[in-house]
Image (cartoon, grey):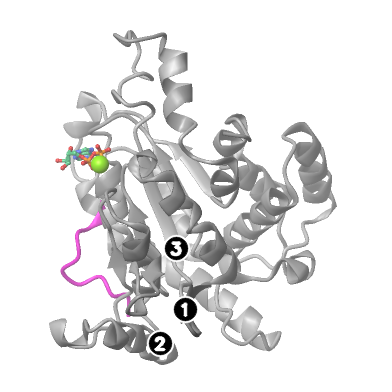
Amino acid sequence: MPASGMLPDLRDIKGQESAKRTLEIAAAGAHNLLMNGPPGAGKSMLAQRLPSILPPLSPRELLEVSMIQSVAGLLAEGALSNRRPFRAPHHSASMAALVGSGLNARPGEASLAHHGVLFLDELPEFQPQVLDSLRQPIEAGEILIARANHRVTYPARFQLVAAMNPCRCGQATEPGYVCRRQPNERCIAQYQARLSGPLLDRIDLSIDVPAVTAADLILPAPAEGSADVAARVAQARERQVRRYAALKLDGVTTNAACPPALLEDVAQPDPEGLSLIRDAANAMRLSARGFHRVLKVGRTLADLDGEERVRRIHVAEALSYRAHADRRPAAA
Ligand SMILES: Nc1ncnc2c1ncn2[C@@H]1O[C@H](COP(=O)(O)OP(=O)(O)O)[C@@H](O)[C@H]1O
Ligand SMILES: [Mg+2]
């Protein structure tokens, strides 16, 4: 059963069809997601609705999540729930708050988001060092905290969901808007440069969320709500669980967590897809990591379609979600 009772529902969101589609893909494969768009576009609203389409925690996941909560002293806060954690630390959060601290060896937000979502709203407003401290756990699914005389490792296999305005004033991509301080392009570039290339490289799905139009807002509520989307997500997740269990990959249940070495086996595209990704890798100068992330998203798209093989159409869509990440300066 999808854990969607009483959570904010996707049906509240008018228009934004492609953003909703991307949210579904993110949920289906546990992929990292970055939404970029002007204030009021509905980015925070979309992120808050992700829990309503995610499958419930498995018993084993629930055990891991409650162990972390117990170490953090949070278990008393509420009864055990099989809902996936959704953590949304403020952008003023310190490194200790985010990844945990050696002083008292308390798990941070990244660990509290284990098997769930770590939502970073206004991503460029976080301190750069704080963001960089997330790179290692994104890759490894765990966090090493060094103390005076020993080290503790906490699990931290979270799904990163981030939102940002295109520039500090938020409007630079609006038609007709002229930034007061400098040319729009420079305003955008300056703001986006606050995000490091290596961090952006770890984002599987990067999309623009345009301002919601008045025409969208007067539409009737969409027919499809979270329960419908959650059902498709659950099916795609079941395929993944079966696949990785058959491969005896302990603890791997999602495409996002699939080790790179195995991707060539499980996400090998058909010949047309292969030639597309080869050409695109050159043209977009994809890093090895970027290449693997495209394969993972392609695998998830095929899983959503219920297909054994990743096809060209899946590769093409997966590539479209990286276009933004790769347009940005790699350095900075
Ligand atoms: N697509 C939408 N459908 C319905 N209401 C919307 C939509 N987008 C924004 N809103 C309204 O605008 C408010 C601001 O949305 P929010 O998610 O905070 O935008 P953002 O995070 O992009 O700045 C929401 O609380 C909601 O009332
Ligand atoms: Mg917001």
User: Which quarter of the rendered picture does the C terminus lie within?
Assistant: top right
Residue indicated by mark 1: 155
**Residue 170 in sight from this viewpoint:** yes
Q: Residues within 10 Å of mark 1 (few under 14, many from 20)?
A: many
Name the element at disc 3.
strand
Residue 77 at x, y percent in the picture? 14, 82
Residue 8 is covered by the magenta coloring: yes
Q: Is residue 256 above or below residue 155?
A: above
Asked if disc 1 and disc 3 are in contact, CB closer than 8 Å, the reply is no
Asked if disc 2 and disc 1 are in contact, CB closer than 8 Å, the reply is yes
**Start-end of magenta stretch:** 1-10
Residue indicated by mark 2: 64
What is the three-letter code of the residue carrying label 2?
Answer: Glu
Name the element at disc 2.
helix
Asked if disc 2 and disc 3 are in contact, CB closer than 8 Å, the reply is no
Q: Where in the image, quadrant-wise, is ligand 1 located?
A: top left
Residue indicated by mark 3: 159
Residue 89 at x, y percent in the picture? 27, 58
Distance between the alpha carbons at the discs numbered 1 and 3? 13 Å
**Residue 18 in sight from this viewpoint:** no
Instruction: Please tell me which of labels 2 and 1 falls first in the chain.
Output: 2
Main SS, magenta residues: loop
Camera-nearest residue between 281 and 23: 281
Camera-nearest residue between 162 and 142: 142
